[in-house]
Image: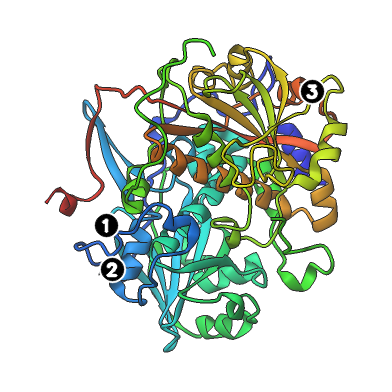
Amino acid sequence: MIALQYHEQTKHHFNRFARSLGHLDWANQPDPFRRYDGAPLIELPRRDPLASAVPYEALFDGSATPAPFTNHSIGEFLRCSMGLSAWKQFGRSRWALRVNPSSGNLHPTETYVVHGGRVWHYAAREHALEERCVFRPGSEAALLVALSSIYWREAWKYGERAFRYCQHDAGHAIGALRFAAALLGWRLRLLPRWSDAQIAALIGLDREADYLDAEREEPECIAAVTAGDTEAWTGQDPSAMMAAAAGGAWRGRANRLSSMTHPWPIIDEVSGATRYPGIGDRGSKTSNSQRPTPNLQLPTPNDRVAQNARSVILTRRSALAFDARSGLRRAAFLAMLRRLRPPSPPWDAIDWPPHVHLALFVHRVEGMVPGIYAYLRDDAVQAEWKAAMRSEFLWERMNDPNDPNGPNDPNDPNDLYLLVPIDCRRMANRVSCDQEIAEDGFFSLAMIARLEASLRQRGEWFYRRLFWECGLIGQVLYLEAEAVGARATGIGCFYDDPVHDMLGLTGNAWQSLYHFSMGMPVEDTRLTTDPGYEWERL
């Protein structure tokens, strides 16, 4: 399979990294903002946020009152998912941060909205919508949101491994959109009937003339956003909307992001092999069922407090360094893990059960022995995972003392197991490309996916979705970190096979796809910070 070949070729090893240019060609650094010259720009409302009083817990329990679909609410939805969160400056260099995280802050993900008989591109820098197509009066009761990737933005820095990072970012973006929808009392669900080719046709990515001198975009996914049940949309045939868009009036030509690009044929190859053919060709290969220390210093306190959900979303940042001494309370840690299991948001946005589980390096969690742990997001996988790992692992179950049914509840959904008690700080550092951020926090982790069997059962298109699932896990942990006064960061650079060797995993059955770390951040005081948008200064 091409996806497995790509995955093997783009692994990092102790003695060599995956292929890249080996340097940063600053003269050709991609523009992080796509625009469509000639497309009308419609400014979104800039004042009076709609969701300023929504509590953080509403992101997960669905308790927010649904807002009507208006320019104001759609603007809030985009601002709190794909908008700018801040501007940073060091000397003469100035760059934007966004609500949705991205590998290297390169942001390959573009966002499109289909609503009211129009196709819009979200211009994040301006917080405005570019009108790409008018096709006919459409429904105002729901909207569609589609994501695409510009692979060159990541390949400029990361070379062949960039395809992986673009898929991480797509997963983070799905999570950001789902949480922004929850903020407004809405639901969001990916639409399985739409093929990638149909998505491209709907949002204009297949229009050759509009990309003559520009880097192309690859369709990733499309979702329905509703104030009620999404089932009516998930079953809809895409053909009618596609036909309407094909006959619509299109405007705008994509801007060029770099003066020149470097080709990476392997990315083109895996992109083609993993395109989603739509539900018609999936047959029986799918299912949308879901099952349900050293130097410890505790800050004051890192249990959750009543917080404003919008503030947590907009203040999310990727940590650059941790203080290597602060700790996390056990109750907060276990609560975070519970967020990673279906069916609460964002897991209701996707149509497959968990395929990604966690190997955790626990460093500084109060009341927990430092060591390597396993967390199962689906308890049915325990026997399979245990058989695949080292036989000497303990598999000692860690019960939750705050479980309402008691600390020894056999049905406790926190399937956390101690594998080996050990000071694993240096190990975490080493396998995560020798990065201190993997050892200096409360914990770090590797996201381990069921790889080969998933692709053989479902198709190579599922390779992308495994990374999306990792991005969703990361998005939950980012918000959970902010909610306890800490910070987190995704780690795309790790030594693939040494991670597997450490756990005793062999072959392609289980592969690590993404690493992550959380701790108390050390801020770089040399940087200045400004609001994401000028009007937010007032």
The three-letter code of the residue at mark 2 reads Leu
Which residue in the rendered view is the most extreme toward the left?
538
2 vs 1, front mark? 1
Which residue is pictured at 78% across the width and 41% down the height?
A: 4
Mark 3, secondary structure of its residue: loop
Q: Is residue 49 left or right of residue 429?
A: left
Which residue type does callout 3 highlight?
Leu
Disc 2 to disc 3: CB gap under 8 Å: no
> Label 2, on which residue?
41
The residue beneath circle 3 is: 394
SS at circle 1? loop
Q: CA distance from mark 2 to mark 3?
A: 59 Å
Name the spot of residue 329 as percent of width and height, x first. 48, 29
Q: CA distance from mark 3 to mark 1?
A: 54 Å
Q: Earlier in the sequence, mark 2 or mark 3?
A: 2
157, above or below 96, in the image: above
Tag of residue 126: 1
> Which residue is drawn at the image coordinates 61% and 77% (left, top)?
231
Drawn side of residue 392 relative to residue 95, left or right: right
Q: Spot the residue most to the bottom.
A: 137
Q: Is residue 411 visible?
A: yes
Q: In the rendered image, which quarter is residue 318 located in?
A: top left
- Distance from disc 2 to disc 1, alpha carbons, whole Å, reads 9 Å
Rendered image quadrant of residue 298: top left
